[in-house]
Amino acid sequence: MWIRGIARRVSEVEIWLMSLLLAASLVYVNFQPIYLIIGLVFWLLRWVAYGYLSRRTPTDWAILVLSLLVPVTLWVTAMPEVTLPQVYRLLCGIMIYYVIVNWASSEAKLRIGLIGLALTGLALSGYALISVDWSDPTRIGILDVIHQAFAPYLRDTVNPNVMAGSLVILLPLMIALVLADPKPLGWAVTLLAGITAAGMGVVLLLTLSRGAWLALFIAMLLLVMLRWRRGWIFVICATAIGLGVIFIIGIFPSTELLLAGTSAGSVETRLELWLRGIMVVKDFPLSGIGMGSFGYVLTRLYPFAAEGSDLISHAHNLFLQVSIDLGIPGLISWLAILFLVVVSAWRVYRWSLVKFGRKHWITNIAVGYLCSQTALIVHGWTDSVTWGMVKPAPIIWVVWGFAIMLENLMYQEINTT
């Protein structure tokens, strides 16, 4: 019995230790294997302490398939030195997902988790000011000066689109918290969420990522529709105005304005890139080509004439990129996780709406999760910066973990009443 008591005490520090190590592994890639080993140790401690390795979740089977595809992607890749860090990043994301799910056992812990998400967004915004490459002349010059001052102390320079892709997932959650009734949640949490939302919003604006802007706009339309009883009227008006602007500008110029960018050139270049990505999936439907090897395979097996195509390392489409890396089974598994997370958030929203009303913080955070996933989907059609190639890729698993955590707490509340 004393062994079980010690295991339970040690297990209580899992969330804090694993969160700190995850942050370290995002900066220092060599920490990733250590992170996974320590995570497995905690799984064994949980088995000793409570008799199970992990709590069951609706996404377990889909995550199992993704995990089983890891040896496949390592086997088929032409660039194991590139694939291995991305595999580690995927496994780290899965690990922190289960850390959150197993830690979440009360409403108080959910509040702490929301504070952690807010602090993560705030830290990400601050880090963006010194790490993002702001050298584009259309941006504020002082930002590039700040970046150049800190560049010697940074391991990598962050692409603005990559930073925007991470921020646009977290920002709807913070906005939803700000809109919630502050009394049951606490004014301090509401204030922190407001400061974080403002900081992330400013940085997102500075990135000039049109895909992220569009994703946030559509996510906010959904938020208005779900948060306010007559919000659908505003959504219809905003949609009509948007369609009118597209009609005036023209479909092709509007598409060019949205898709064209420094990382993938013109619309023609991106469409050609997507076409070759589809060709890759057609030729390697079951195994994919190995995580991170798209640029290498593209230039050797599917070359195209667009200038600078040899510098393109990913397909600029999240769903296409997952299928390129892990094959169609990987895409189905990943989409299944996304679908189940959305379903979980929707269930919590409907339950909380009836039980607490539209202003309650649980209702609002469920809306935030739905909007967060909407932003992920919309932004995913034009970029793939939330997948394995970028260091902040595990952030989406953090969001997914809290979404499942929210549903588990809902069922606990239902069973106790």
Image (cartoon, rainbow, N blue to C red):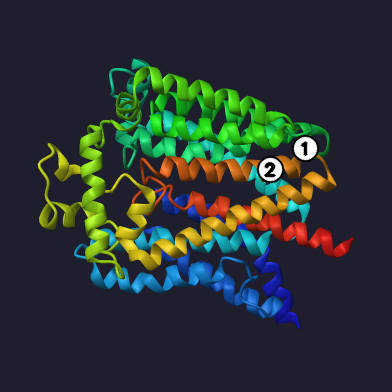
Whether 379 is drawn above or below 297: the answer is: above
Tell me which numbered mark, 1 or 2, is placed earlier along the sequence. 1
Q: Position of residue 408 (x, y in %)?
A: 71, 61
Name the element at disc 2. helix
Whether 212 is drawn above or below 206: the answer is: below
Name the side, left or right, on which 302 lies relative to 32.
left
Q: Which residue is mark 1?
A: 358
Q: Position of residue 57 (x, y in %)?
A: 62, 67
| Residue 250 seen anywhere in this rendered image of the structure | yes
Closer to the camera in the image, 349 or 299: 349
Disc 1: CA contacts within 10 A as few (<14), some (14-19) or many (>=20)? many
Residue at x 47% of width, y 58% of height = 335
Q: Which residue is mark 2?
A: 365
Closer to the camera in the image, 232 or 189: 232
Q: Amino acid at mark 2?
A: Ile
Q: Amino acid at mark 1?
A: Arg
| Residue 91 seen anywhere in this rendered image of the structure | no
Name the element at disc 1. loop
The image quarter in which residue 181 lies: top right
**From the viewer's perspective, is the residue at label 1 or at label 2 nearer?**
1
